[in-house]
Image (tube, rainbow, N blue to C red):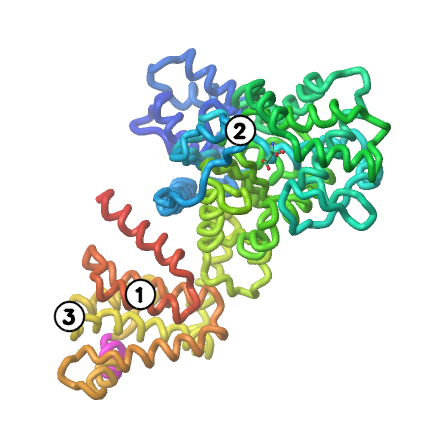
Amino acid sequence: MDRMRTLFDSVAADGVTDADRIKARIASSGIDIADLRLHTTMERLAEWGDRPIDFEKFSEIVGPELRMINRSFQRQLVIPDWEEFCSDIETIYSNVAPNRSGRNADYIPILRDADPERWGVAVCTVDGQRMRLGDVDIFHSIQSVSKPLNYAHALVREGADFIHRFVGTEPSGRPFNALDMLPDMRPFNPCVNAGAIMIAGIIASGSPDRDARQITQDVMDLWSRLCGGIDEVRYSEETMLSERATAHTNFAIAYLLQGRTGLPRDVDLHKMLDLYLACCSIEMTTEMLAVAAATLANGGICPITGEEVLPTEVVKKTLAVMQSAGMYDNAGSFTLEVGLPAKSGVAGAVLVVVPNLMGFATFSPRLDEYGNSVRGVAFCRELVDRFTFHIYDNLSGGHTGCKRDPRASQHEQKERDLSELRWAVSYGDRYATKVRDLMLNCMIDVCLADGDIKEDEITTISATYAEIMGQPTSRQELDHWIDSRRGQHNGGESPNTGQDQTSFAQLLEILASERSSLDDNGREVILESAFRVACSDGSIEDEEGVKLRAIARSLGISEGVLELEIARFQRRLAQR
Ligand code: GLU
C-alpha cells in the first residue's frame, strides 16, 4: 500500500487529485495519454469525469496498469528527464530550421511541388515516450525508406540464405540508381535500387497468386504494426503512376537483373517493378516513421503496443544494412560522422535508429547532392555532436567530449563518479585534486573576465565549490587561490589593465595539456563550475561567454554541448 500512497501523493494536494493532474503527470514523462498501455486508466478517468479522486478511487483507477503508471510517475523510463531532453531537441530543431539549401526531388510532380519549407522531427523511445516538432502529421511517400523494411519482410518470409543468393551486402559507393553490380553480378545491397528491385522480386516470387498491389498491402500491414497503428498507412496511386511513367532507369535495372543475375523463381519482371514502385508510393507521416524506427531500436518489439513485429535477428540484419548503405552514396561519411543506422528517401524523410534507446524521423523535402534531406542530415549531425548516440561513443574510455547521455543509467553513473571525486579529494587523491585545482582556477578566471573579482563573486565561487565538491573551502584557501590567479593576471606585460589575456591563455594551455588525463566527468565538473559562476548574476556577459567557450574548447568539449547548457540556463531564467 505504501508505494501506492507515494504515487498518489505525487499527484495529490489535500488528499485528492483529478483526471487533469494525472494526465499532465503522464504527459510530462513523455507517454502519450492515448498510449494503449494506459487504455484502461484513461477509460476509467473518462468515466469518472472531473470529480475529485481520492486515494481509494485512485488505486482502483490505476490498478490494472499500475506498472506503467509507476514507471511514468517515478521517471523510470529510458529517458527519465524527458522535458529537458525535449527542450534540447527543440534547440537543435530550431538551429537547423534556417537551412534552406538543397532542392526538392523533381522527377515527378508530386515531389517537385511539395512545400519545401516543411520541417518536422518526431522521436519515440524504446519505452514509448514520444515528442513531435513541426510538420510531423504530413503524409508523404516513403520512397526509399521502404527499402530496408522490404528487406526485413523478405528475410522473415524467405530467410537470409535465399535472399543473399540474389542480393549482396556490400556498400556500393555509387548513386542509388546506378547499373553497377558486384563482380558476381548480384546487386550491391538491398538499399540501392538494383538490390531493392531484386528484393521486391523475391517477395513477389513468394506470392505467385497475388498481384503487386495485394502484396503491397502486406508490406503496408507490416508498416502499420511497426508504427503501432497510430495512424493509417496510406498508398498514393498518383505517386505510383508518376513513378511508373518515369521509371526508365529502374526498368533498365530490372532487365539487367533478369539478363545477368536471373530473377528469383522467374518472377514476372513487371510484377517485380510494380511492387518496388508501389512500396515507394506508400504514404506515412513523420510521427509514424519515428515509432517504426523505435520498434527497430527496440529489437522488433513495438514500444507502444508491445507486439513483436519482427524477430530481433531480422532487425539486426536490417540495421546493419542501413548502417552501411542507408544514406545513398553518402552512407560512409554518414556512418563516420553520425554513426547510426538510417535510411532516407527522396520525398525528404530520414528514419534513424539509436539502438536500445530511441528511433526518430525527420521530414524536410530539400535534398543534397546525394538525395538525402539537407535538414535531416544536419539534424543528425547536430544531435550526435551533443549526445552520445554515435555507435562508437561508448568506446572512448570516458572521453566523449562531455556529450550528453539522457539515459537513466548514465544519470546514476554520473552521480557515482561525482561522489567518488568528492571522497577522493578529501584524502588528497592526485587526480581529484587536479580536477579541484583546475575548477578553482577556471571559476576565478571567469570572474576576472571584467578586470577584478568582487566580494559577491567570491561568495559565488565558494558556494559553487561547496555544491559541487560537497564540502566548503576555507576563505583563507580561496583567497590564496585568488591572489595567485590575480598575481598571474597582473604580472603579465600589461599590469594595469587587470585583463591580461596571457594568464588566461596559459590556463587554457594547461587545460588543453591536461585534457587527455581528465575523464568526461572531470572535464564536465570543471566547465560546469565555470559556467555556474558566469551565470550567477542572471546573465552570461559577452566576455564571460567567450571565456566559457574557450574553456570548453580547451577541454575538448563540443560547442554544441555548451550551447545546450546555455539554452537550459536561459529556459530556467525565463521560468523564474
Ligand atoms: N522511387 C524512387 C526511384 O526508385 C526512389 C527514390 C529514392 O527514394 O531513393 O527512383
- Residue 558: x and y in percent read 42, 61
- Residue 557: x and y in percent read 42, 64
Which quarter of the picture shows residue 206?
top right
Instruction: State the predominant SS element of the stretch in magenta.
Output: helix
Q: Is 313 above or below relative to 142? A: below
Which residue position holds label 2? 108
The disc at residue 455 is 3
Q: State the separation of the CA atoms marked 1 and 2.
A: 50 Å
Q: Is 188 above or below relative to 348? A: below
> Does residue 124 appear in the picture of this structure?
no
Choose mark 1 or mark 2, whichever is in front. 2
Choose mark 1 or mark 3, whichever is in front. 1
Q: Is 202 above or below relative to 416? A: above
| Magenta span contains residue 97 | no
- The first of marks 2 and 3 along the sequence is 2
Picture quadrant of ligand 1? top right
